[in-house]
Amino acid sequence: MDKFAAPVQFQYMNRFEYVRRGLLGLLGVLLFALSTLPSGAAEEPRVVRVGVLAYRGSEEAETTWETTFGHLAQTLPQYRFEMVPGSAAFLTAAVAAQRLDFLVTNPGHFLELAIGYSATAIATEQDMDGTAAAESVGAAVVVPADLGEVQQLSDLKGHRIAAVGSEAFGFRAAWAEFLERGVDPFKDANLLFVGFPVEGVLEAVRTGRADAGVVRSCLLEKLVAEGKVRADAFRVVGRRASGTLRCQVSTRLYPGWPFVKVAQTPTPLARDVAKALIAMQPTTGDVVWTDPVDYQRVQDLYRALKVGPYTPFSRLGMLDFAFEHRWWGAAIVMAIAWWLIHVGRVSYLLRKRTQELQRAHELARLESERMEHTVRLSLMGEMASSLAHEINQPLAAILSYARGCERRIDGGTDPEGVREGVRRIAVQAERAGSIVRRMRDFVRKNPSRQVPVDPAAIVADALALFESTATARGVKIEADVPARLPTIRADRLQIEEVLLNLLQNALEAVADRPEPRIRLTAEDGAHTVDFAVADNGPGVAPGARDLLFEAFFTTKPEGLGLGLSLSRTIVEAHGGRLELDLDRPGETVFRFRLPQLEEETRV
């Protein structure tokens, strides 16, 4: 038994050692394999979600930005970049819900995100074909090639215009161009919004649903190159210079699409992505990224159109604005309360001082009326002898006719002659009464009342009062007044006073002239009635011209110095202006204009 025990035990031990050593060797190989793996291989890469504005649909967006996303994935393997295509409204909602890290969108959408959500651009697209990043995006307004009646943007007034939507950047760029040419597409045209993709705009134009369409710049050329649109099917209207952009455009050019960082994206991640984009070297025809450009031109566009961030606040917007700025609001309310107290105090003082000023103005008005009445009395005093002579004529005629009638009555043979004499006595009595009535009305101190009057009638009354004075001095007045003149709103007596003042001054100026001449004219001046009194007197001395209309300044030995000053005040109170006209050699002309009464006011 002992002989065979040792060999059996030896054989058993050899087999166990063999298995143990095999397991140890396999474990060593496994540990070596694990040690050769990269340290982060077991870690899941961080997902970076990038929203992309898909104006031609999701598939087209993936094809367009495939090179950019491939470059980012290769350059930054520690991140897994995920494209999220969608419309502007969808992407804005995703930013608000903090579901995106970056966006690739148009300049207008970026402006709204920058102001509303503190987004920033870290790069701007630039075509490899040489397009400047600051001038690479615009819009084209296309029409069917056979629509000959439309040659420029202003010809689209009253036509049907298709676009993706009212919020589309291309439509807003075209909107500004329409407004510049006097066409408001929301009022002067029929708008048709077809939504995404943008090819629907061209389809609406092709099928006749619209007469014109607004599309993104270079889209038409791209579709022609892809064979999806015939080159002769459409044409671009309102073409503008496109600079380095090799496409037809109808609008100004704006900066290219930005690569946008949202507010919550970590700064190190944004820095890595920006470096990768700037270092990207795509092939010809692809998009290259450059440092972000200034988007002020886009901001100016939206401000001019009052859209996007510059839309007037809605009710909900006002509530949000008030809540966000509630501390500023409280400070403003306190400032307003203090201001109201201050205004109340100042109002009390102003009311008190205003009453004092009103009393002073009333006294000044009464004094002015007294001065005006004094000037009238002065004028009547200067014309008294002439007016007395004019009244004396009808009185003498009445006396003569009365005695003639008396003789015929005594003879008892000419009853018809007596009747004729009495009729003539009545005529002369009415003439004398008319003269006295005009004198009384002119001298009477009546309150000023501006009513619709006939300018020709005012001139006729003034001439009737002044004609005897001029005749007594041996001066003939030439009157050039049309029978019909536009109606004016005026105080009849005050305007007569102005004319009599000017005529009296002219009469005194020509008193010593060998061939005295005074001319009074009134004419229709389109929107005014123009009055002028001209004489061939010695004129106005240069030193007196600046003081001519000042109160109490006079060149007459016995003058009051109030006539021209009050005349100018009266004319200005009627909305006119009294001036000295020095443009006529050999004549002194005083001219004033009064506004015509509007037709609807007359009715």
Image (cartoon, rainbow, N blue to C red):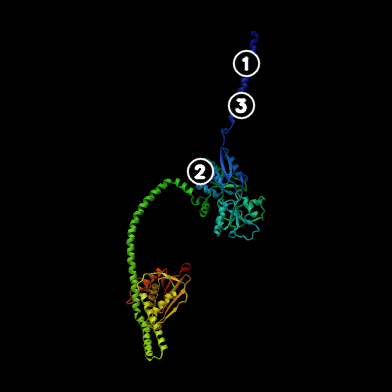
Q: Name the kind of residue labelled 1 in the image.
A: Met
Callout 3 secondary element: helix
Secondary structure type for disc 1: helix
Image marks 2 and 3: residues in contact by CB distance under 8 Å: no
- Judged from the image, the secondary structure of the residue bearing numbered disc 2 is loop
x and y percentages locating residue 24 in the rendered image:
60, 22
User: Between disc 2 and disc 1, whose residue precedes?
Assistant: 1
Sequence order check, earlier mark of 2 and 3: 3
**Which residue is more in the foreground, 258 or 435?**
435
Work out whether mark 3 precedes mark 1 in sequence or the reverse, and give the earlier one: 1
Cα separation, mark 2 vs mark 1, equals 70 Å
Q: Which of 318 and 179 is in front in this view?
A: 318
Contact, CB < 8 Å: mark 2 with mark 1?
no
Q: Is residue 589 left or right of residue 251?
A: left
Residue 311 vertical position relative to residue 549 in the rendered view, above or below: above
Dot in front, 2 or 1: 2
- Residue 341: image location, x then y, percent: 35, 52
Q: Which mark is residue 560?
A: none
Tell me which amino acid carries mark 3.
Val
At a point 63% along the width and 14% down the height, the residue shown is 10
| Badge 3 density bin: few <14, some 14–19, many ≥20, Cα 10 Å | few
Mark sitting on residue 29: 3
The residue that label 1 is drawn on is 13
Q: What residue type is labelled 2?
A: Ala
Q: Which mark is residue 263?
A: 2
